[in-house]
Amino acid sequence: VTEVETAFFARLKDAQSILSDPHRRSLYDAYGETGLRWIENPSEIDPKKALHHFTTSSTGDRGRVVAAFAVLTTVVLLFPLLLCLKLDRRTPLPWMLVFAPLWLLEALYIWAQVQTLTHLRRSMRAAEAAAARHGGSGIGGGGGGAGRAGGGVDEDEDEDDVGVPSEEE
């Protein structure tokens, strides 16, 4: 077995593991192979590649990254500053104001989690609908498509309805 064949088999095995896991598949669909690797193992991020991806991304994406970094940095640094001011009794800040940056950070974290779960749910619905249209068993096997008794799809169903919840859901 040659080195080329071994590398090809490893890529096939990796592709199969991504496609068989709904979570990994949705991450791959959203961020590509590099994004999936970075999410699964952040220590593998090559700074040169990250900088290249950042510089070649759209202006809007770069602006969102810079804004997010600025907000997070401000929120993270603001709490210790306010806490020191409160403990040194230099200002009559109420405790609620001192802890507000942490609450804001918590709210941002919860918002990000909700967005991720919403995206994952849409991706899984779209994949299940596509599998049902093509006669597959959907993600996770188990026969039947999209929760219908016959496992099939109505012949008059419009393809534009992918990801739109049905009245049954």
Image: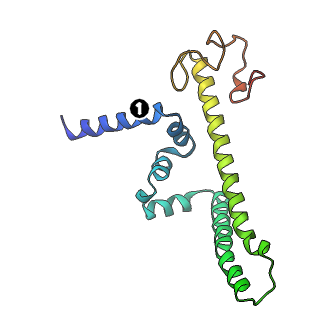
Is 93 left or right of 109, judged from the image as shown?
A: right
> What's the residue at 68%, 47% (across, down)?
115
Residue 114 vertical placement versus 20 (above, below): below
Q: Dot 1, crowdedness within 10 Å: few (<14), some or many (≥20)?
A: few
Q: Nearer the viewer, residue 87 or 161?
A: 87
Is 81 left or right of 6, judged from the image as shown?
A: right
Is 57 left or right of 106, judged from the image as shown?
A: left
The C terminus appears in which quarter of the rendering?
A: top right
Report which quarter residue 152 is drawn in. top right
Q: Position of residue 142 (x, y in %)?
A: 52, 18
Q: Nearer the viewer, residue 50 or 23?
A: 23
> What's the residue at 46%, 31% (across, down)?
20
> What's the residue at 44%, 53% (across, down)?
41
Q: Where is residue 135 in the image (x, y as percent from the top left)?
A: 56, 15
What is the three-letter code of the residue carrying label 1?
Gln
Residue 159 vertical placement versus 154 (above, below): below
Q: Where is residue 161 in the image (x, y as percent from the top left)?
A: 72, 25
Q: Which of 103 and 163 is in front in this view?
A: 103
Q: Where is residue 136 in the image (x, y as percent from the top left)?
A: 53, 18
The N terminus appears in which quarter of the rendering?
A: top left
The residue sitting at the left extreme is 1
Report which quarter residue 49 is drawn in. bottom left
* Label 1: element kind: helix
Q: Name the residue under label 1.
A: 16
> What's the residue at 47%, 45% (across, down)?
33
